[in-house]
Amino acid sequence: MTDLPPIDGAATLTPDDPVVSGSAGTWTLTYTVGEDEIQPGGVLRLTIPAGFTPPQTDHPGAPGFTTASCTAPRTTLALIVEEGQEGARGAELKLFLDTVPLQRREKVVVVYGDRSGGSQGAFACRTAGETAFQVAVQTGRGEMAFRPLKQSPVLRVIAGETRRIVVLLPSLVEVEKPFPVHVLAHDAFGNVLPARGDGLELQAERGDLRLPSPLTLKGVDGALRAAAKAPGGPCRIRAIHREAGIEGSSNPLLASERPDEALLWGDLHGHTTCSDGTAPPDAYYAHARDVTRLDFAAVTDHLDAGLSEGDGWEQVRFAASAFNEAGRFIPLIGFEDRDASGGHFNVYFQDLIPPEAFKNSGEALTVPHAHGRASWASPDLRTVRLAEVYSCWGSAERWGAVCSNTHPSRHPGSTIQAGLAYGLRLGLVAGSDTHTGAPGSALRVKMQSRHPGGLTAVYADAFTRPALWAGLKNRRCYATTGARIILRFEVEGYSMGSEVDLGGPDDPLIKGRAIAVKAYGASRISRIDIVRNNADICSYRGDNDVVQFRWVDAQDLTRISVPRPASKHPLTYYYVRVLQEDGEMAWSSPVWLTLTYLP
Ligand SMILES: [Zn+2]
Ligand SMILES: [Zn+2]
């Protein structure tokens, strides 16, 4: 495609004041022809931003009805909505202009959400942020390409009324050491508003906490500090806004005298303007750090859809370097690609280096996700240590289960259980796969697909990049559907992610294994399943937000372990699945037991 210069002309949008997310309106786009005349056969293209009601020209009484007119007499207009042109940036309307040339100062007027036929208008997208009504013109002078307008009108979508208060706390803290309390207000669609301090009350719902006083909140950065007075937990903080009649409870927090690890929360999957996302990398990282209050987040743009073109890599690396701060936020960089069998995977780099440098020296982690015709037998996957069990497309643990994956290109052979059965040692992670620049925003991501975005929790020795990397690499991590559930899972004292080799027939673990589970829910836990070699072998019914139990598997390991394509020796694995009453879930990384003395 040849690069043509931008078209001369001007476009305005009326009204252009901020619109509340999801609300109805009628917008008039007026294009005024500039130095570049439009010849008969010319086309004006208008892109209605993604998430807005798709435009239509057939049903005057239905939402999105769109009409067009022109100030030039004897001009014939044909307004067409291109089928299948609804991409990440929006739906395309094309206006074919015929009969006479359109000269300077002539106007073309498009009314989007025209109410004259009884329609409610058109509905703005549910995601707050800037949206562009992009205008491009094909002048009909034998030019096939569309020339964009230098400046297309921008409409600001803002959050609506507060419907929900969210309180976020770190999961593991030290006694008497102040920790941040973030209070966020969400509208009906999960857009985050500044939480106003006035009228807001905080209560220690559980646990012995020193709460901030007086209570002052500045913008979305609720710069509040609390501290635990004694070890224990789970502690929770409830925020109450009496006037508005809204309240919200925090995630659980455990306090100890000398915590030897941190539990870091992050989103490992999302796209920016460097491929098919709508927000640039710096806005993406800013959302993760300042809005959803994640400890880490990765940008994973498509290698084959823009990332490797132009300065995509440089943009991502530049943004990541600016946000990189141990103890506060760790940006990860990587990319999404497909293997020879068509399966999707993400690759992450430990350091903020470009992929060429990585090939020679750096360390990377490859994390497949169940899209495309993936085959776990692919030689590329022999060294894989992690897999994405959940994203906004749903759960890939096994098909047909609760919140099962709905991605159009999912494939039966690509479930997590298929990979584990193949003998791969897959630690489990989750992400959102956000394309709207909303990492960690469960609700905002849900608007773009069927499920809320997921989060990965990593046990790390410290809040640093090397410690986060080690936690991921050693599979000391688990996946959730977005709830900050604290989960501990051990088989005979070996924590999640461990590989245990049994060297002889006298090993006591062959006769029986004690499995210990501790889960502190973000709300009430309804069930915890222990899964052994893909079968649910023990289900513990809960009715509380804290569930702790021990269960002994007395099956002889030699009778249940089998050799697998990717494992020389017979192998058994366990993991746990947590279900909350509100539908949120968590999956631990497995523990593997290998009978290395048997062929
Ligand atoms: Zn994918
Ligand atoms: Zn993706």
Image (cartoon, grey):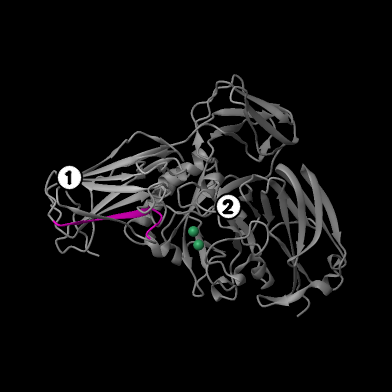
The span picked out in magenta is 85-99
Q: Horizontal and vertical percent for residue 315? A: 37, 51
Q: Is residue 95 magenta?
A: yes
Q: Position of residue 270 (x, y in %)?
A: 48, 53
Of residue 359 and residue 238, the one placed in the foreground of this image is: 238
Q: Which mark is residue 535?
A: none
Give the residue at the far top of this rendering: 214
Residue under pointer 2: 451
Q: Which residue is located at x 76 percent, y 75 percent?
A: 562
Decide: few, some or many residues near mark 2? Use Cα within 10 Å; few <14, some 14-19, many ≥20. Answer: many
The alpha-carbon separation of the residues under discs 2 and 1 comes to: 46 Å
Residue 252 position within the rendered picture, expressed as x and y whole percent measured from the top left: 69, 39
Residue at 61% x, 64% y is: 385
- Which quadrant of the rendered structure holds the N terminus? bottom left
Where disc 1 sits, the SS reads loop
Q: Earlier in the sequence, mark 2 or mark 1?
A: 1
For disc 1, the neighbor class at 10 Å (few under 14, some 14 to 19, many from 20) is: few
Identity, as a three-letter code, of the amino acid under mark 2: His
Q: Quadrant of residue 472?
A: bottom right
Cβ at disc 2 under 8 Å from ligand 2: no
Residue at screen point 50% across, 44% down:
288
Question: Quick one: 553 or 247, which is closer to the camera?
Answer: 247
Residue linked to disc 1: 71
- Using the rendered view, name the quadrant where residue 524 is placed: top right
